[in-house]
Image (spheres, rainbow, N blue to C red):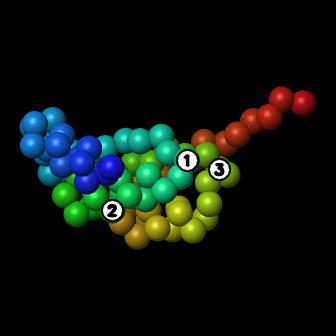
């Protein structure tokens, strides 16, 4: 999915190397987007919950993704 979405956006001229992709993610899609962004020369920012798995955060960090972590508030 990440290859198709980002590759087609670049073919259309909607994205160019150096542009930033931002995605709210809660699973493996963020890691895939971080990887494909790195390969295509794009910058990637993942917006994710503080409940997101540490191993997936580390995987995104390996591809130089920027992360914005949102805390989850639960009403009393």
Percent position of residue 48, x then y:
55, 46
Residue located 53% across and 62% down the image: 57
Name the residue tied to disc 3.
50
Q: Which mark is residue 8?
A: none
Percent position of residue 6, x then y:
24, 46
Viewed as shown, does residue 10 lie left or right of 2? left
Looking at the picture, does residue 75 appear above or below residue 62? above
Q: CA distance from mark 2 to mark 3?
A: 21 Å
Q: Earlier in the sequence, mark 3 or mark 1?
A: 1
Q: Earlier in the sequence, mark 2 or mark 1?
A: 1
Front disc: 2 or 3: 2
User: Tag 3: Cα neighbours inside 10 Å, few (<14), some, or many (≥20)?
Assistant: few
User: Tag 2: Cα neighbours inside 10 Å, few (<14), some, or many (≥20)?
Assistant: many
Front disc: 3 or 1: 1
- For mark 2, give the secondary structure: helix
- For mark 3, give the secondary structure: loop
Name the residue tied to disc 1.
26
Q: Earlier in the sequence, mark 2 or mark 3?
A: 2
Viewed as shown, does residue 15 lie left or right of 47? left
Name the residue tied to disc 2.
35
Looking at the picture, does residue 73 appear above or below residue 54? above
Residue located 40% across and 70% down the image: 62
Extreme residue in the top direction: 75
Looking at the picture, does residue 10 appear above or below residue 52? above
Residue located 35% across and 53% down the image: 33
Using the rendered view, name the quadrant where residue 60 is placed.
bottom left
Q: CA distance from mark 3 to mark 1?
A: 10 Å
């Amino acid at each position: 999915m990440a290859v198709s979405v980002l590759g087609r956006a670049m073919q259309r001229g909607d994205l160019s190397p150096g542009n930033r992709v931002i995605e709210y993610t809660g699973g493996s899609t963020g890691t895939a987007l971080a990887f494909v962004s790195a390969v295509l020369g794009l910058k990637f920012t993942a917006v994710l919950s503080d409940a997101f798995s540490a191993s997936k955060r580390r995987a995104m960090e390996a591809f130089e993704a920027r992360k914005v972590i949102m805390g989850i508030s639960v009403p009393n």
